[in-house]
Image (spheres, coloured by chain):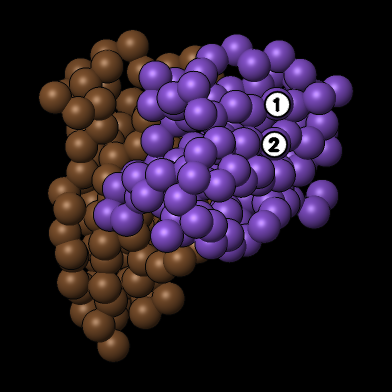
Amino acid sequence: DTGVSQDPRHKITKRGQNVTFRCDPISEHNRLYWYRQTLGQGPEFLTYFQNEAQLEKSRLLSDRFSAERPKGSFSTLEIQRTEQGDSAMYLCASSLLHDGYTFGSGTRLTVV
Amino acid sequence: QKEVEQNSGPLSVPEGAIASLNCTYSDRGSQSFFWYRQYSGKSPELIMFIYSNGDKEDGRFTAQLNKASQYVSLLIRDSQPSDSATYLCAVNRGYKLSFGAGTTVTVRA
């Protein structure tokens, strides 16, 4: 059990560029979640996968955001045409049951 | 009304004292309640969870749940400088966790 891994740890991008983040959950966890956290706020739910199926996508996610989890293993979160308001910490978490998540270290995105 | 509300703090306590953190939630159907600790610049780390009314103790931490009052709290006994962090209350119904904004605790040596 090596925990939840996220890559990259930091990303600086120019407005309008596309970015993609990767998450590798704990291997036996079939549930995977993406959250976003801005300064001074708690994490906000973005989307949820059970195995490879995306079961819910928050209204916070515009059409510029897409997430995948091919084969129920790692997941990617892509943001197209980034905006300054997308600057945040993007957190991935996984769980086996709904008994609390294990979070990864997060990807800090800065859009300039 | 926010789903989960916490005292924003900051809460400053002397080393060795008890830190008391409070959280209220709006959804009466919530089943599980979690406390996460988050150090500055780091991701949240699960420290306690509670499902049933009453108290649950784990080392220096005690979680208290009162579903009738829709209230959950966290007590940190014998506070240490290493406890200085933001504490996030989270509530779930089904698979999704809703988080409060967190309470920042500073333990003075």
Q: Nearer the viewer, residue B38 or B61?
A: B38
Label 1 sits on a secondary structure element that is: strand
Label 2 sits on a secondary structure element that is: strand
Q: Which mark is residue A76?
A: 2
Question: What residue occupies the far front of the structure in this picture?
Answer: A16
Q: Quadrant of the N terminus of chain B?
A: top left
Q: Measuring from the top left, give residue B32's x and y in whole percent.
A: 43, 26
Q: Is residue A27 left or right of residue B67?
A: right
Q: Measuring from the top left, give residue B68's x and y in whole percent.
A: 20, 18
Task: Mark 2: give few (<14), some (14-19) or many (20+) Cα within 10 Å.
Answer: some
Does the rendering let one see residue B32?
no
Q: Is residue A31 left or right of residue A42?
A: right
Q: Nearer the viewer, residue B70 or B102?
A: B102
Q: Nearer the viewer, residue B21 or A40?
A: A40
Q: Nearer the viewer, residue B51 or A56?
A: A56
What is the three-letter code of the residue carrying label 1? Answer: Glu
Q: Chain of mark 2?
A: A
Quarter of the view holding residue A80: top right
Question: What residue is at 50 percent from the left and 56 percent from the top?
Answer: A14
Q: Which chain is purple?
A: A
Question: What residue is at 19 percent from the left and 28 percent from the top?
Answer: B2
Q: Which mark is residue A68?
A: 1
